[in-house]
Structures are given as C-alpha cells and as structure tokens.
Amino acid sequence: MKTVKRLSLTLLAVLLAFSVFCVCVSAEGENNDIIQNDKVYAVLPEGYVISGGYNGIIYFDEDINLINFLVVKNAIAPEGIQKTDFDNIKSAFIENYICDQYTSKSDVKLNITKTEEKTVNGLKAVAFRGNYFVGITEDAEDLVPCEFYSYAFATKEDVFFVTYEQFNGVFDIKDLEETLKSFTVNGTFFEGESPTVNHSFEGAITYDEAVKNADEGLYSDIDAETMKIAAVFIYAFALIPTLVIVIVIIVVAVKYSKNKKQLRKYEARYGQISGGYAKPYPPTNNGYSPYTQGYNPQPGGYSPYTSNQYAQPPVQPVQPVQNAVQNTENKENQ
C-alpha cells in the first residue's frame, strides 16, 4: 500500500510537472529546490521540486527520483548515531520511513547491502544502502524492489534520515551526494560534532508545519479540471494490476476451451492420445492403411487386420528360353 501511495503521488507529480516547472507550486516556507525549517536545511540539485509531505518531506525530479527528509524523536541513539547498534537504526528506518497506517513491520522485507560510517559537513552519520519489499517477499518473479540509499544523523533531540530512491535507470546517488554538500541540522550536538555549514534557523517554521504545508501546498494551486485528470490517471494506475490479471485469465480460459474442442475432434477421428502422442498406423507399401484397428510393434502383439481387396495374384515363374527352343525342335522332328 505504501508503494502504491508513493507511485500515485508520483503519477500526480508527473502529470503536474509542466505546471510545476513553469509556475511555482510550493508550500509556505519551502522553495522548490530548498528545504528549510527549524530542523533541516539543504539545497537540492536543479530540477527537484516538492511532491508532498509523506513520512517526511519528499522532493522529486523529472525522472521520478525521490529525496526524502525525515525527522523523528531520538529514541535510539542517546550517545550519538555511530555509537548505537545498527539494528536500532534499521528498526527506526522501517518503522518511520517505510511503515504507515496500512503497513506494519511484519509486512516489510528489508535487505541491507552496505553500511559505513561517514562524516558530512562536521556531522557524524551512518550511511546504508539496500532495497525493500512491502506486503510480499522477493520470491515473486515480477516484483521489483525499492532501491534506496540513506544517511542517518542524530542530535540529542532528533534522528534524521536523508534517503534517496531511484525508480529508473542504473542506481546512482550523485544527486544525494550533491544535496548533502549543503546539508545541516539544528539541535544539540554530541561530542566531536560541529556543523561546518553556516545557516541560521532563527524564525524558521517548524518541521511539522513544513510537512503539513508540503502536503497542502502541493494541491493548493491546482485547478479542478487538472485534479480530475490526475484522479483518472491515479485510479487507472490502481486498477491496472487487477485488469491485467482478469484479461490473462480470460485469454487462458478461451485458449483452453478452443484447444479442448480441437483435441476432441482429433481423438474422434484418429483415436485417443497416449503419452502425449497419437498412436501411429502401421505402414504399408502405399503409406498408412485406413483400415487398421490397432498397431502394436512389440513382440507378442496381435497382428493388425488389413483388407486383401487389392492383393496381387502370385507371379508365375518364367520358363527358361533354352527349354522353350528345345520343345520347338522336338515338335518339328515328329
């Protein structure tokens, strides 16, 4: 459900892309390429715009790649993000980034392929890469996992996840790395941390307000006609899997019915199929005999009955020429 909701937002975002890039559609306190509130500040690469507040604040580009800024209360890293067990970071990521009101932890299959400790602009971080499935395991052949790369930061008050997801092409985190060049957070830092990016958070709106504005601001300047078109696309997208399944079932049923009828006609004319092959008729000099009742090439089997209607009479032996000449001479001498 989470993936469907994300993709639905993405479809809407793509539908609105032309107007978004031409007309500034952004939440109050949030520019299209800058995230700024009382918790987080960063400048995104050119081409990224807000696509809503959903388990964080999401930005997307024209290729539907996402960068998400998520802030939660620090309940896992009382001594700093690099001093906590990674299982705690993983659990917080699943619960706060992947799960929602429709998804529980038991519905999530998360695979971590890489982890490492890093320092970003004077802030300590744990970077991790992987993929996840929601509501189904990776055993499904046609299921594509959600690939992501995330950085986890912490102050004494909060934990921050900056996460990149790519929907198309070869996975490349250059946009995430570009974003992190200007990234900084607000809060009480742990020993050994001191941000090198200078940014004043004074007078900034709260993070919660920014999330709310991101959701409301995405739709506020959209006319009713555009919303109707967007709704049609979203509903059509949601129905596609069901329609495909129904169509496949109908096609298979029709093909099975036709094949079954053809099979019955074949067996009525030529006999039953055994082992997947029709029993062949015994060959004669002129081909297959249509009068054969059965054929068993195994030793001890019964001989097939064939009609002798067209049997040829026995051929008489030809007398040698020499005897014929002798008989003629004897008759002349008599």
Image (cartoon, rainbow, N blue to C red):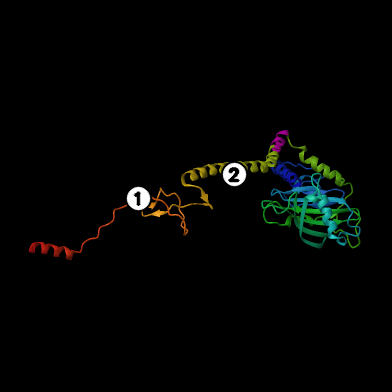
Q: Nearer the viewer, residue 165 or 245?
A: 245
What residue did someone put label 2 on?
252
Left or right of 291 on screen, residue 264:
right
Which residue sits at x=84%, y=57%? Answer: 89
> In the orientation shown, which residue stands out farthest toward the front?
334
Label 1 is placed on what type of residue? Asn
Left or right of 315 on screen, residue 23:
right
Quadrant of the image occupied by residue 241? top right
Q: Which residues are magenta?
A: 224-231
Q: Nearer the viewer, residue 84 or 36?
A: 84
Left or right of 250 on screen, residue 318:
left
Quadrant in which the C terminus appears? bottom left
> In the orientation shown, which residue stands out farthest toward the left?
333
Question: How many numbered circles does the render carry?
Answer: 2
User: Callout 2: helix, strand or loop?
Assistant: helix
Q: Decide whether the magenta segment is chiefly helix, strand or loop.
A: helix
Of circles 2 and 1, the one toward us is 1
Q: Position of residue 219 (x, y in %)?
A: 76, 39
- Could you tell me if the residues under marks 2 and 1 are in contact, i.e. CB atoms within 8 Å? no
Magenta stretch: residue 229 in it? yes
